[in-house]
Amino acid sequence: MPRQAWVFLLALALLASCSSTPDPVDPPPPVGPSGSACVPTGELARRYGLIERYEPERNRLILEGPGSRVVLFPGTTVAMVNGTRVRPMRRISSSSDRTYQLAPSDARRIESMLRTTKKSPAPQVPTRSLRPALHAEKPRSIGPVLDSTVEAAVRIPLKRKWKYIILHHSGTKSGNAAAFGRHHKQVRGWDGLGYHFVIGNGKGSGDGQVEIGYRWSGQLTGAHAGRAPDGSNKMNESGIGICLVGNFNETHPTANQLAMLRSLVAYLRGYCGIPMENVLLHRDVRGTDCPGKLFPVRVFTE
Ligand SMILES: [Zn+2]
């Protein structure tokens, strides 16, 4: 092959993937994992308090929050910010675990468009209510990510020091808070629903719908984690139990469930002052496979 052709192919290969080589005209990316020149879309979503969801049937990734909507088509160079096409734009790359990456220059362009094209209405809830209530953590872009009705129900006076968030699956194909509550009462002999929150999968309640249990409304000890290794009940007394409907040994959680879980956990962490390392899977505190082997552990760390 002639030398020019090799040079051309090499240039094409460099253009094709933003992770192959840092763009020499770009300064270091403002965000993103160390060692990577790309910006994960999840990082962008977190910075702007947007919920990320992927629609496989249309191969599009949507980052959305009040007044802001970014639509990305992975594998292509098409992206929209609040209805305006982002130009120029390099290919949006994706990996097998459904994480998506932007070239740093594209991420900056999208951020600048987000800042300048934000649509009204403004968030319906006062900004101050979204800040951490108990602990002055560094400001984070929790953002107005929860529906205002859900937010109002979650944002109640705290009557105990919540230290942990513990994630569960229901182990059932379908269900909702009422059904699990009946089961916990009749079969387990508890007062009622053991979890503080249930996030539906579209079978028994809405896909991504949050149901708030009486143990959160009443700020009561949970019944979801079992005894801690030291024999104490501390994981129930100070652990917020969130259950996703589904059996994640057999199926994956839905994109809407994961988006809502991220938002709810981010909100609760900020509101209760819970550090990331105290967001645990049930199997971290007890001999169980809950929340299932297909639960994407990286959902909070990517
Ligand atoms: Zn569990």
Image: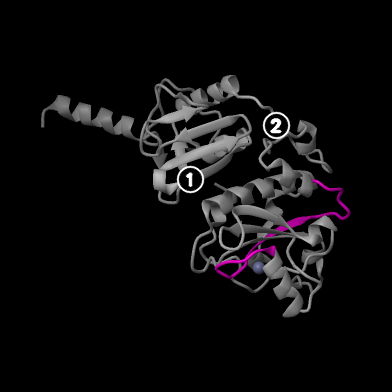
So how many labels did they put on this image?
2
Cα separation, mark 2 vs mark 1, equals 23 Å
Amino acid on which disc 2 is placed:
Pro
Q: Is residue 117 above or below residue 158?
A: above
- Quarter of the image with the N terminus is top left
Q: Estimate the x, y position of residue 54 in percent, counting from the top left.
A: 48, 45
Reading the chain from its start, which is encountered first: label 2 or label 1?
1
> Residue 243's quadrant in the figure?
bottom right
Q: Is residue 243 magenta?
A: no
Amino acid on which disc 1 is placed:
Tyr
Q: Estimate the x, y position of residue 4 in percent, counting from the top left.
A: 16, 24
Which quadrant of the frame does ligand 1 lie within? bottom right
- Judging depth in this view, the residue of 134 and 84 nearest the camera is 84
Disc number at residue 110?
A: none
Magenta highlight range: 155-177
- The residue identified by callout 2 is 123
Mark 1: give few (<14), some (14-19) or many (20+) Cα within 10 Å: many
Can residue 34 be seen by looking at this rendering?
no
Q: Is residue 165 magenta?
A: yes
Q: Going by the image, does 281 lie left or right of 35? A: right
Query: Is the residue at mark 1 in contact range of ligand 1, meaning its CB lies under 8 Å from it?
Result: no
Q: Is residue 237 above or below residue 278?
A: below
Can residue 150 be seen by looking at this rendering?
yes
- The residue identified by callout 1 is 54
Query: Is the residue at mark 2 in contact range of ligand 1, meaning its CB lies under 8 Å from it?
Result: no
